[in-house]
Image (spheres, rainbow, N blue to C red):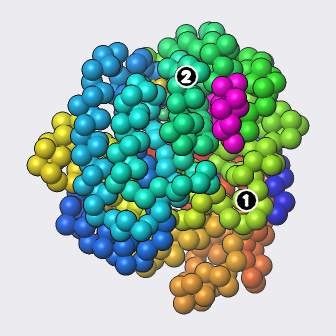
């Protein structure tokens, strides 16, 4: 497929609304507390009956210091003792959940996210991985997608070597911006030396892919200052980039109130920074995967997209099949059977459930047939920028044009604006529509009208 991207500031300005990131459909806002442990157990039965490989997400919430912009689920503490009781509960949960899933099902994907997974000591990470391998069936080759997020400020060469020994591959790590003034304004001081050391160590240890997180839209950023960061990081050629749009929602994320709003770049400057990012990364040979992600053309993510084998889940894009995802740890969200399930959102409730040997289920939602159809449509569009009506009709026994008559009508304006082409056989997103893929997916979202205010801006 063609992986070209066109930056059209006029179109972007016209379509600049708030919208979900579609790591799931329905989005996490539809989860409700009417869903409990018994409902989850029923979904696990259904999942085992269907079989197939598994994906595991493990949440380690701790961070040593707070980055003011952060919208992740984290607990800030410089007391390393806090990790141990959490780890013990996590291992209890792994044993409880592991016993419920068919042992024959292979773990094709694993992701440790946070917070900061490398807040744990090497010995604690070993204990956690041992528990996972004891209670789930891991692959014996190096072909699984077993990934981890690391913070270069919390990592040295021996940590990276240990992660590789534990079976991790690929790796991703946070940078955000090299500019000292920006770093001070967001309370994240991170040197070039410690950032590059992670990449060098990852290469030495044989990680097949290393990805760097950047954020545009942070306080005091300018096109010029961000270009300097881009030049520095491009010089070491990471395999992938995640370039996130800063989501400033101080009502929801308290620490963002420490950011001086007067220092935030204007919408025009933000857009100009995004334009620079796209120009620099594409000139350097990276391809746009979609939704903030860029990769080298020979990276497995770019190859999977060209071959029509890309998937998307709560961890973003993935090269492995659309398997059931088991969430482990506080706040984790899983997708099992026909449901999404979220664990308890605070340490105490999480610990209480496990002390009673109960699953720490907090919320969930069971998808109906309409949700499943729309999820498939949105997944195809966001991963491959095209949709084949015939495939959806065959999978769900519907007539696409009848089922989505209103949506097809709503797409006409986007077609006139040059975002996409609708033919009798499907939808093709054009290079100018790629940055606006969220807007296109939003047309197919049945829940959107009632929740529009809870999301960040599309660009
Ligand atoms: C869990 S952190 C990565 C691992 C580690 N904690 C670190 O910061 O290095 C996940 C990433 O989410 C992104 N992020 C966090 N808050 C954000 C926000 N408000 N807007 C956009 N991106 C954000 C950052 O790029 C961050 O690296
Ligand atoms: S960006 Fe990473 S290190 Fe910073 S507070 Fe968020 S999760 Fe923690």
- Across and down, in percent, residue 280 comes to 83, 33
Judge whether 149 appears above or below 23 on screen.
above
Number of numbered tags placed on the structure image = 2
Badge 1 residue CB within 8 Å of ligand 1: no
- Across and down, in percent, residue 17 comes to 58, 47
Judge whether 384 appears above or below 252 on screen.
below
Start-end of magenta stretch: 200-215
Query: Does 214 lie within the magenta span?
Result: yes
Q: Residue at x 75, y 47 (%)?
A: 299
Q: Quadrant of the N terminus?
A: bottom right
Q: Residue at x 65, y 32 (%)?
A: 205
- Say which residue label 1 marks: 305
Q: Nearer the viewer, residue 425 or 38?
A: 38
**Disc number for residue 158:** 2
Q: Nearer the viewer, residue 225 or 302?
A: 302
Q: CA distance from mark 1 to mark 2?
A: 34 Å
- Across and down, in percent, residue 312 comes to 57, 57
What secondary structure is marked by label 1?
helix
- Across and down, in percent, residue 264 comes to 58, 21
Q: Residue 42's image quarter?
A: bottom left
Residue 90 horizontal side relative to residue 401, left or right: left
Q: Residue furthest right?
A: 283
Q: Residue at x 52, y 71 (%)?
A: 374
Q: Residue 387's image quarter?
A: bottom right
Sequence-wise, which precedes: disc 1 or disc 2? 2
Q: Nearer the viewer, residue 229 or 398?
A: 229
Judge whether 352 appears above or below 37 on screen.
above
């Amino acid at each position: 497929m063609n992986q070209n991207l066109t930056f059209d500031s006029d179109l972007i300005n016209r379509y600049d609304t708030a919208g979900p990131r579609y790591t799931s459909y329905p989005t996490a806002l539809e989860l409700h507390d009417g869903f409990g442990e018994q409902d989850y157990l029923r979904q696990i039965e259904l999942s085992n009956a269907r079989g197939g490989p598994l994906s595991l997400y493990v949440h380690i919430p701790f961070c040593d210091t707070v980055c003011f912009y952060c919208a992740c689920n984290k607990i800030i503490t410089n007391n390393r003792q806090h990790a141990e009781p959490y780890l013990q509960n996590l291992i209890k949960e792994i044993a409880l959940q592991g016993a419920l899933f068919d042992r024959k099902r292979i773990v094709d994907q694993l992701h440790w996210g946070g917070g900061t997974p490398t807040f744990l000591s090497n010995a604690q990470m070993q204990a956690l991985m041992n528990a996972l391998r004891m209670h789930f069936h891991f692959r014996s080759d190096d072909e699984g997608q077993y990934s981890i997020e690391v913070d270069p400020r919390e990592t040295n060469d021996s940590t990276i070597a240990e992660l590789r020994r534990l079976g991790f591959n690929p790796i991703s790590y946070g940078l955000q911006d090299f500019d000292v003034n920006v770093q001070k304004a967001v309370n994240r001081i991170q040197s070039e030396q410690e950032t590059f050391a992670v990449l060098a160590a990852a290469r030495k240890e044989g990680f097949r892919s290393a990805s760097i997180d950047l954020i545009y839209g942070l306080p005091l950023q300018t096109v010029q200052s961000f270009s300097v960061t881009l030049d520095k990081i491009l010089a070491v050629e990471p395999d992938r980039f995640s370039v996130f749009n800063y989501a400033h929602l101080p009502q929801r994320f308290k620490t963002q109130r420490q950011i001086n709003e007067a220092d935030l770049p204007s919408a025009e400057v933000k857009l100009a920074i995004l334009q620079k990012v796209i120009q620099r990364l594409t000139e350097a040979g990276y391809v746009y995967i979609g939704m903030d992600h860029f990769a080298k053309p020979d990276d497995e993510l770019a190859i999977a997209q060209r071959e029509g084998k890309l998937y998307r889940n709560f961890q973003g894009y993935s090269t492995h099949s659309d398997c059931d995802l088991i969430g482990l740890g506080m706040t984790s969200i899983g997708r099992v059977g026909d449901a999404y399930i979220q664990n308890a959102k605070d340490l105490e409730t999480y610990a209480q459930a496990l002390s009673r040997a109960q699953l720490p289920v907090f919320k969930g939602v069971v998808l109906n047939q309409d949700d499943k159809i729309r999820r498939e449509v949105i997944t195809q569009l966001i991963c491959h920028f095209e949709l084949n009506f015939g495939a959806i009709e065959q999978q769900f026994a519907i007539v696409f044009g009848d089922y989505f008559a209103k949506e097809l009508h709503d797409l006409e304006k986007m077609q006139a604006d040059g975002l996409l082409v609708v033919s009798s056989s499907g939808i093709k997103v054009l290079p100018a529509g790629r940055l606006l893929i969220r807007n296109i997916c939003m047309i197919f979202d049945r829940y959107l009208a009632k929740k529009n205010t809870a999301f960040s801006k599309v660009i």
